[in-house]
Amino acid sequence: NAGNLVLVGLALWGLMVFSKLLRLWASLRGVMCLQVGPTTILSWNPREDREIRLTALSRGRRAWAYTMHGVRLALTLTVWIAGNFYLVYAPKNFGDILLSMLWLPRVLDIS
């Protein structure tokens, strides 16, 4: 039944958007845990590890990071709502529903 497939598509689409929101939240928590200083500080110790670590952010870069996270949140929620409307109202047959379910995650990856 096409109606049941739309419900499955909505559930899977919601889970995919939720996982994107969790990654966004983890990134935002990383920014919030950094120290605030007058300058941005990168540290690197080539003997211990081969990573460059961000240890402090300037106020301007922190504000920019918060702004970008807000934009990403708004874009993700907009794509989620548009995808829900598309799954509910656009497909008319079984093949269109399957095609929509396959391509909606690619739209989310682009955003």
Image (tube, helix red, strand yellow):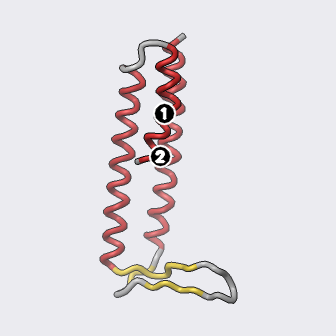
Measuring 32% from the left and 69% from the top, which residue is drawn there? 64
Q: Residue 22: image x %, image y %?
A: 51, 51
Residue 3 located left or right of residue 46: left
> What residue is pinned by disc 1?
103
Badge 2 element: helix
Quadrant in which the N terminus appears: top right
Whichever of callouts 1 and 2 sits on the residue coming sooner in the sequence is 1
Please tell me how crowded label 2 is: few (under 14), some (14-19), or many (20+) other residues with Cα within 10 Å. few
Using the image as rendered, state which of residue 65 and residue 97 is in the foreground: 97
Give the tally of numbered discs: 2
Left or right: 3, with 82 as reference point: right
Q: Position of residue 94 (x, y in %)?
A: 51, 14
The residue furthest top is: 1
Q: Residue at x 64, y 80 (%)?
A: 50
| 87 vs 22: above or below | above
In the image, is residue 32 above or below residue 91? Answer: below
Residue 109 image position (x, y, % from top left): 47, 46
- Asked whether the residues under the numbered discs 1 and 2 touch, taking CB atoms below 8 Å apart as contact, a structural biologist would say no
Q: CA distance from mark 1 to mark 2?
A: 10 Å
Q: Residue at x 40, y 38 (%)?
A: 80
- The foreground one among 52 and 15 is 52
Residue 84 pos. (x, y %): 40, 30
Which of the 4 image quarters holds residue 88? Answer: top left
Q: Name the kind of residue labelled 1 in the image.
A: Trp
Q: On the image, numbered disc 2 is attached to which residue?
A: 109
Q: Quadrant of residue 77?
A: top left
Q: Residue at x 32, y 78 (%)?
A: 59
What kind of element bears circle 1?
A: helix
Local packing at callout 1 (Cα closer than 10 Å; few below 14, some 14-19, many 20+) is: few
In the image, what residue type sits under mark 2? Asp
